[in-house]
Image: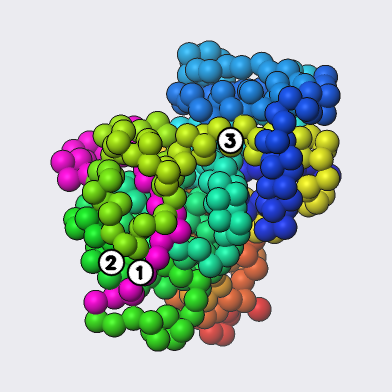
Amino acid sequence: MPGLRHLVSIDDLSLDEIKKLFVHARTFAADLRASSELCRGMIAASLFYEPSTRTRLSFESAMLRLGGGVITAADMRNLSASKGESLADTARVVSGAYADIVVLRHSSEGAARLAAQYSTVPVINAGDGAHEHPTQTLCDLYNLWIERGHIEGLDVVLAGDLRYSRTIHSFAYALARFGANVVCVPAPGFEMPDYVLQRLREEFGVEPQRADAKSLGDLATQSDAVYLTPQKPHQLSLFTDARGFAIDRVDALYMTRPQTERHPSGAQLENYLQLGRRELSAESLRDAVVMHPLPRKDELSEDLDSDPRAIYFKQAARGVPIRMAILASLLGRLPALEREPASTTKHHPVTEGANPCVNPTCISRTEARHVPPQYRVSSRHPLRVHCGYCSHAIPLRLVGCSTTRHWHDPESVELRKVRPDHLVFLADLAEAERLGFAPATRANAPA
C-alpha cells in the first residue's frame, strides 16, 4: 500500500527519523499519562510465536498509554499455527479488521518481512529468530542518547553471546550507521558471525582490528577482543601497535545472556563471561554505563544492581516511551516518519530452480506455503547475494541469466552485465542443463 510503513529492520528508518523518535520518546517519558488520547480507538495485535515478557508487555503498555486497545495471542504456536495456518494467512486475517497495527515475534528469521508483504496495516518486528530485533535496538540507542547526549563517536563494548543474539546484530549495524565504535568481547565460541562482519565491512567500511585486551582488565581475560570502527583502515593504523588498538575509555558496556534457545546441541557454556564489580574495575571501564536487554542469568551479578553505572532497569523502563513513539509514528499520529522507508534495497523473487537459501531457520524454509523465495544483491563484483528474508549469504556455484539462458562462473566479470532481477542460482551443471542453460562464452555473453 502506498505510504504504508513497516518496521521490519532498523534499516527501515533513516538516522533523522530515529532521532525524531528519540525526541518524541523523551516527551512521552516526561509524563506517561499525558497522551492517552493520541491513539484512541486504534488496536494493536500482539502475535508472539516465542515467549516474551518485557517486549510484549512494554508494547501493550505503550499502546494502552496512548489510549488504544490491545488484542494479544501470547503463544501462537498453540493457536492457529498448530492447526496449520500459515503466517501469511494470519497476517491477512489479523490486518483485515482485527487490528490497526501488528507486533510480531517469531522463531523463524525473516518472518516479519513475510508478514509485512501480506499485511494491510503496519507490521513491527519484535524479534525474528537470530536475525533482528529493531525495537530493542531503538531502545538501546535511545538509552545511549539519553545517557551520553549523542551516539556518534562513542566506544561501546558488546560482550557475551555475539553469535546468536539478534539484539547484538541489530545494535552493531545501528552503531556503525551512527559512526560509533564497537569493541567485541565474545564468550569463547560465541564470536560475531562472519555474515555480520561481512555486512559491516561492505556497507560501512568497517575493518575488524585486534584490540589490546589488557586495557579491559578482567573482562577480556578469556577473549580475543576485536575493535570495529567505521574509520578508514589507514586512519586506524595511526593508533595501533603490535598489541592491538588501545582502548582508553569505554562509554558503554552491553552484556548479553547466552541465547541457549538458539544454540546447537553440544554448545559449551563452562567459560561463559560473568560481569561483576571485579570485571568493571579496569580504568577504561570506570565511566562506562552497563546495559543488558534482560532477562539475565548468571552472566550479570546482582552486586551490580546498586552500582551507579548500571542502567539496565532504566533501560527496560525506557522501552515503553520509545515504543509509544514507534507505535504512534507508524499509525500516523506523530510527524516522525517520511512516506517511504529509508532502505531502498530491492528484493527480487527467485523465479527458477530451488530455494537458494541454505539457512534452516529462515522463514522460506520453515514455512512451505505462501513464501516465494527472495534475494537481494549486495555486491555486483564480486557477486554477493543474500536471502531477502533472513539476510544469510547465498552460496554461489553457477549463476545463470534468465534472458540469454547462459550460465557463468560466480567470479565472472560478465555477470555485471546481467540485470539483478535476471539472475538464476544454479546448484550444479545437472540443474543448469535441466533448466535449459548453456555455458556462456565471451562471444555470447549477455549484453
> What residue type is disc 2 on?
Ser
Magenta range is 243-272
Q: Main secondary structure of the magenta part?
A: loop
Do tag 2 and tag 1 residues touch (Cβ < 8 Å)? yes
Regarding mark 2 in the picture, which secondary structure is present there? helix
Left or right: 339, with 71 as reference point: right
Regarding mark 3 in the picture, which secondary structure is present there? helix
The residue closer to the viewer here, 356 or 3, is 3
Q: Position of residue 123 (x, y in %)?
A: 67, 35
* Residue under numbered circle 3: 319
> What residue type is disc 1 on?
Ile
* For marks 2 and 1 on the same chain, the one whose residue lies earlier in the sequence: 2
Q: Is residue 87 shown to the viewer in this render?
A: no
Regarding mark 1 in the picture, which secondary structure is present there? loop
> What residue type is disc 3 on?
Gly
Task: Tell me the quarter of the image containing the N terminus.
Answer: top right
Task: Tell me the quarter of the image containing the C terminus.
Answer: bottom right
Q: CA distance from mark 2 to mark 1?
A: 6 Å
Question: Image quarter for residue 65?
Answer: top right
Left or right: 118, with 278 as reference point: right
Q: CA distance from mark 3 to mark 1?
A: 30 Å
* For marks 3 and 2 on the same chain, the one whose residue lies earlier in the sequence: 2
Q: Position of residue 149 (x, y in %)?
A: 61, 56
Left or right: 165, with 111 as reference point: left
* For marks 3 and 1 on the same chain, the one whose residue lies earlier in the sequence: 1
* Residue under numbered circle 1: 247
Q: How many marks?
A: 3
Q: Is residue 419 above or below residue 191?
A: below
